[in-house]
């Protein structure tokens, strides 16, 4: 399925679900046979409410977060037939019914009927992630330990900001991605900021927004910025690594728990199908993010 929705022709209705989760106890979003995943839990809840689906409800996700990565603004779509909807009785109760069945570390925040052409993954025009670091200047908060990387020494914020500038734009980010046969590593990083947040305990927040991300890309970029903040490399060194387009000898991929998907953007409804088609032409394989 996974195409522009026309219920009168296709016999199904597409729904958009916005959700959040603590990724600590999950082996990423995508369903796996031997590991507990966010998608796996969602499918169990959906099956209980709507019955079995041979196509797993044609679920598609905006950002396939890796193991241990969190989300406050994840987006998925599911396709339901009128027969499946009759099992629920009324769609207004879908969010409550699913949340009652889901573990407490996964919450659905909204359920809406998707506009024509909507595809949770391919219609997305950008994703935004935040990586949180507590260095020597940020008191360690045990309540945030599951979503913050702790570093004992002080990081040079100005060096990190200077290095971030060199990673902006449209580039081949092969030096920061785990290679995957048939998948492009060309991405457009539109925003990359590094700042302290006094209101959040003086932690360092790295925010990055791009059209999409390939596997490990965000955490590898954070690794480059941390190396710069530790004076183990320079802004020029980061640019040279980007230009090499090789993971060999590249920067350390940082732990997943500091990373959270915080926003997914979509174009106006009349541009959704066009955006989806363009994205499909650019990316040939599903790729994990983070």
Image: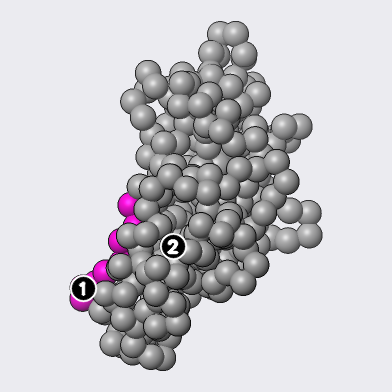
The residue labelled by disc 1 is 199
Residue 240 point in image, percent of width and height: 48, 64
Q: Is residue 2 visible?
A: yes
Q: Is residue 224 magenta?
A: no
Give the magenta part as a residue range. Answer: 191-199
Instruction: Count neighbours of disc 2 (C-alpha within 10 A) and say few if under 14, some if 14 to 19, many if 20 or more.
Output: some
Which residue is more in the foreground, 100 or 151? Answer: 151
Residue at point 62% right, 13% down?
10
Instruction: Using the image, determine if residue 196 lies above or below residue 183.
Output: below
* Extreme residue in the left direction: 198
Residue at point 73% right, 46% down?
181
- Quarter of the N terminus within the rendering: top right
Which residue is more in the foreground, 214 or 18? Answer: 214
Residue at point 57% right, 47% down?
185
Instruction: Using the image, determine if residue 75 lies above or below residue 158.
Output: above
Which residue is more in the foreground, 112 or 277? Answer: 277
Residue at point 62% right, 72% down?
249
Instruction: Using the image, determine if residue 239 lies above or below residue 77.
Output: below
256 relative position to 260: left or right? right
The residue labelled by disc 2 is 239
């Amino acid at each position: 399925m996974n195409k522009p929705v026309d219920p009168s022709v296709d016999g199904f209705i597409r729904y958009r679900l916005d959700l959040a989760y603590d990724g600590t106890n999950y082996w990423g979003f995508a369903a796996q046979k031997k590991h507990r995943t966010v998608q796996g839990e969602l499918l169990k809840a959906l099956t209980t409410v709507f019955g079995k689906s041979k196509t797993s409800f044609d679920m598609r996700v905006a950002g396939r977060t890796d193991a241990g990565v969190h989300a406050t603004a994840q987006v998925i779509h599911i396709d339901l037939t009128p027969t499946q909807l009759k099992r629920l009785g009324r769609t207004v109760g879908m969010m409550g019914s699913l949340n009652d069945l889901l573990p407490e570390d996964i919450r659905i925040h909204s359920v809406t009927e998707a506009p024509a052409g909507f595809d949770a993954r391919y219609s997305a025009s950008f994703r935004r992630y935040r990586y949180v670091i507590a260095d020597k200047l940020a008191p360690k908060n045990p309540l945030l330990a599951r979503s913050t990387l702790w570093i004992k020494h002080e990081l040079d914020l100005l060096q990190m900001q200077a290095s971030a500038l060199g990673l902006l734009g449209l580039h081949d980010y092969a030096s920061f991605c785990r290679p995957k046969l048939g998948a492009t590593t060309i991405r457009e990083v539109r925003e990359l900021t590094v700042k302290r947040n006094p209101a959040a305990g003086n932690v360092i927040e790295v925010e990055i927004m791009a059209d999409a991300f390939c596997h490990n890309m965000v955490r590898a970029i954070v690794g480059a910025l941390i190396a710069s903040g530790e004076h183990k490399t320079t802004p020029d060194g980061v640019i040279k690594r980007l230009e090499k387009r090789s993971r060999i000898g590249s920067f350390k991929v940082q732990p997943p728990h500091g990373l959270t998907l915080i926003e997914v953007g979509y174009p106006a409804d009349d541009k959704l199908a066009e955006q989806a088609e363009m994205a499909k032409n650019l990316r040939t394989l599903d790729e994990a993010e983070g």
